Image (cartoon, rainbow, N blue to C red):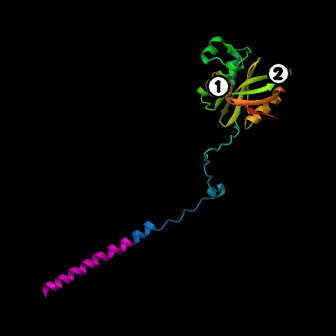
Amino acid sequence: MDKLLEKNNLVKLLILLIIPVLIIAFFVSRSVFIPEEPAEKTEEEILEGPEEEPETLEPGGTVELRPNTEETNEDLLEFQKFLNDNFQFKAKSGTMALSVDDFLEKKQGGEQDFAFYASQILYEKGYIISFVFVYEYTDKDSQKKKRYLTVFNDAGTPRYFYFDNQGAHLVSDYGRNFLELCLHEQTRTGLKVNGYGTVIFGNLNLEPSGWEKFDY
């Protein structure tokens, strides 16, 4: 009889110990799975509106170039001065450009040589998008000729150098695409542009791999 009473007391004690544990576990589990209410937004956050989603580039898509609101990069003006102070323009025919070393040694060259040299130096200076752009035009004697430009991107702003007897000239912003570049050149020179193309970076032969017709 005594053993039975002792056993019953032990069961009651276990029950008294287990019940509080179960109650605590119940409330803990609710606190884990019940989502917290969002914190109230401050007045500044409300006025600012929702956060903008970051832009993503879809396969085959393009990113719109945005104009640079700052003034022309002083380094580019220094580079233009360097070209004009150290190299002499001497027109030549053909599509072959001098290498960087040969251009530095000769200290002179045509559009082809200036354009290639500038594209290489700008790339080395951090202007990753830098290349030679070629367009064909009809001169005042109805002869078809080519011009060679160095086109590059400066913090979202498209710019280019053109070269003539007066040396190197920086154009701060020609537009948003190659058609607008050709229109800009057509207006600047007063000559009819017939077509254009780009040259593979680092290629000394400045003949474009393909030509796009320009008829505006």
Q: Amino acid at mark 2?
A: Gln
Residue 159: % across, % down: 71, 31
Residue nearest the viewer, comparing 158 with 1: 158
Q: Which mark is residue 56?
A: none
Q: Nearer the viewer, mark 2 or mark 1?
A: 2
| Quadrant in the rendering for residue 162 | top right
To which residue does mark 2 refer? 143
- Helix, strand or loop for disc 2: loop
For residue 160, side relative to residue 11 (left or right): right
Magenta residue span: 1-26
Indicate whether 38 appears above or below 64: below
Q: Amino acid at mark 1?
A: Ser
| Quadrant in the rendering for residue 108 | top right
| Quadrant in the rendering for residue 5 | bottom left
Quick check: is 112 in the magenta stretch?
Answer: no
Residue 111: % across, % down: 72, 20
- Helix, strand or loop for disc 1: helix
To which residue does mark 1 refer? 119
Residue nearest the viewer, comparing 24 with 53: 53
Q: Residue furthest bottom?
A: 1
